[in-house]
Amino acid sequence: MMKVLSLLKQYRFPMIIAILLMLVELGVELWQPLLMAQIIDDGIVQNDLQTVLEIGGLMLGLSLLAFGAGIANSFFAAYASQNFGFDIRKSLFEKVQAFSFSNFNHYPTSSLITRMTNDVNQLQMTLFMCLRIALRAPLLVIGGIVLALTVNIKLALGFILVIPPLLFFLIWIMKKSTKLFKIVQGKLDRVNMVMRENLTGIRLIRAFSRGEHESKRFKQSNQDLRERTVFALRVTETAIPVLLFFMNLTVLAVLWFGNIDIQNGNVTVGEVVAVVNYTARITQAFSMFSWIIMVFSRAMASTDRIEEVLVTESDLPDGNNKLETADLAGGKIEFKHVSFRYPGTKTDVLRDINFCANPGETVALLGATGSGKSSLFQLIPRLYDSTKGKIEIDGVDVSTLEFDHLRKQIGYVPQEALLFTGTIKENLAWGKEDATYDEMMKATKDAQILETIETLPQKYETMLGQKGVNLSGGQKQRLSIARALIKMPRILLLDDSTSALDLKTEAKLLEAIKPYKCTTLIITQKISTAKEADSILLLEDGEIIAAGNHDDLLKESKLYQDIYQSQLGLAESS
Ligand SMILES: Nc1ncnc2c1ncn2[C@@H]1O[C@H](COP(=O)(O)OP(=O)(O)OP(=O)(O)O)[C@@H](O)[C@H]1O
């Protein structure tokens, strides 16, 4: 909880002012019964109009003071709570940005979204309520007891005895509710996950006619959330009737014994009215407790969930080798006895990989699906670290390089061409923020997408929907390549990024990339693409089983010959 609380520190002054203002309100509230007793005993009973007017005037003035303090309190409470929420969201976002992929495996995206939105809202709201009204309840109870004792010890003791067992009961309920609300937040994660999958996969769901199945899945998780929330609310809500029952009994007892004492002349009517008034206010404060328990229990559960993310350390530490860009200018990539397994799994998906791609060379990676090609790629920009061996770029171990410095040299085009909501220009700016119009023209021309962009009415200003939904698969691939090329990378990684292109366009694209003189690693299923590379690595089951250029492999590798034959057959028959 420390990390979350430490974010509160800088708002201590507005919080202190809000609390002081709240104390002014509370002071007025607690003073009123005493003034009321005075107005009855010294004014009404004595038939003294002057006293009634004086005390009445004082009560009115105090009410106005409390009114002003209340408004100012809201202002400071809103300032502190909104800024607190803003800071938590910012810290969470920065933390998640630095997460490794195994961290992401631990926290599903939907859960991270719930934590950043719903959980933060809970904390924000709780802080506001605390500063505004929630703290008043316990203070009202304490102040009420003290003042009631000063009015009449005997009468006040009656209800004071009831309070400790009620407090224990409240603490017990609060602990139970915190656990229950943590489960509720988990169920909310699940609803968000199902909803997210449905919204992003809506086309597939329709194509496979899975609408009914998905509706059932959503209904189930929604029902779970409802049931868990209802149960948690019921548990917290049981507090209220229990509290009210005991406090009302106490009011009756005060009235009963007060009546006897008035008959005996031991207390005045005003004193009994004051003690009853305090008991009623304390009862009111207690009834607020059930609501406070619910808000606090939710906030505690949310704090735990936020804290969990904030204390998570990335298992992919940033390197600290700040070499000048020029030091990586060559772009030579060397894999030395590299093995790799995904975090949390038991088998290596890459075993003893050795190869070297010299500056400006093109190396093609060929292999069956699941043979480890994409995994190998991900080790170069350090999306994962190798489990054994090392990867060097221009002789520097990548694990010692700063992420930013390393990744700036790399143009990575992943298998799934992922674009973002925004204009084409904004998507290209991902590669280079200050790209000029000419740079955009060049990159898009080389990526063979310029012609398409020019046919669009708004050209580079054309808005792309979520994930580039308004482009074809091949157009998305080419725009992703342009985004990588505009960086003028030293190293270009193309993960099956030309799969949706026809052979002619692909050939033109590969030819246009040559002048960039970057070291290019290209994953491909097509012999026609591999053939053009300086060397080819043939992967099978996580190992390089053959390496060389097209002619070498045609002579030496049975598997390569088979692939060649099968594609040659296809080419001839088409
Ligand atoms: N995030 C992950 N966690 C655990 N295992 C994974 C993960 N991603 C991939 N794998 C496993 O690693 C192996 C290699 O996968 P990889 O994606 O590298 O293969 P690939 O050769 O690129 O396949 P494809 O041609 O189908 O893209 C597969 O057995 C896959 O199941």
Image (spheres, helix red, strand yellow):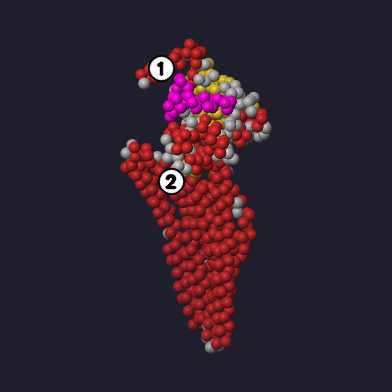
| Circle 2 residues within 10 Å: few <14, some 14–19, many ≥20 | many
The amino acid sitting under disc 1 is: Leu
Query: Is disc 1's CB within 8 Å of ligand 1?
Result: no
Residue tagged 2: 192
| Residue most extreme to the top | 555
Q: Is residue 501 visible?
A: yes
The amino acid sitting under disc 2 is: Asn
Whole-percent x, y for residue 461 in the image: 50, 43
- Looking at the image, residue 237 lies above or below residue 118: below
Q: Residue at x 38, y 51 (%)?
A: 227
- Mark found first going from the N terminus, 2 or 1: 2
- Looking at the image, residue 389 lies above or below residue 280: above
Residue tagged 1: 568
Q: Residue at x 40, y 54 (%)?
A: 230
SS of the residue at dot 1?
helix
In what quadrant of the picture does the C terminus appear? top left
In magenta stretch: residue 528: yes
> What span is colored magenta in the figure?
500-529
Judged by depth in the image, the label closer to the viewer, 2 or 1, is 1
SS of the residue at dot 2?
helix
Q: Residue at x 50, y 27 (%)?
A: 509
In magenta stretch: residue 274: no
| Nearer-the-camera pick, 32 or 198 | 198
- Looking at the image, residue 363 lies above or below residue 453: above
Whole-percent x, y for residue 6 in the image: 61, 51
| Nearer-the-camera pick, 382 or 315 | 382
Distance, label 2 to label 1, CA atoms, is 48 Å
Whole-percent x, y for residue 420 in the image: 49, 41
Whole-percent x, y for residue 381 in the image: 57, 31
- Looking at the image, residue 177 lies above or below residue 370: below
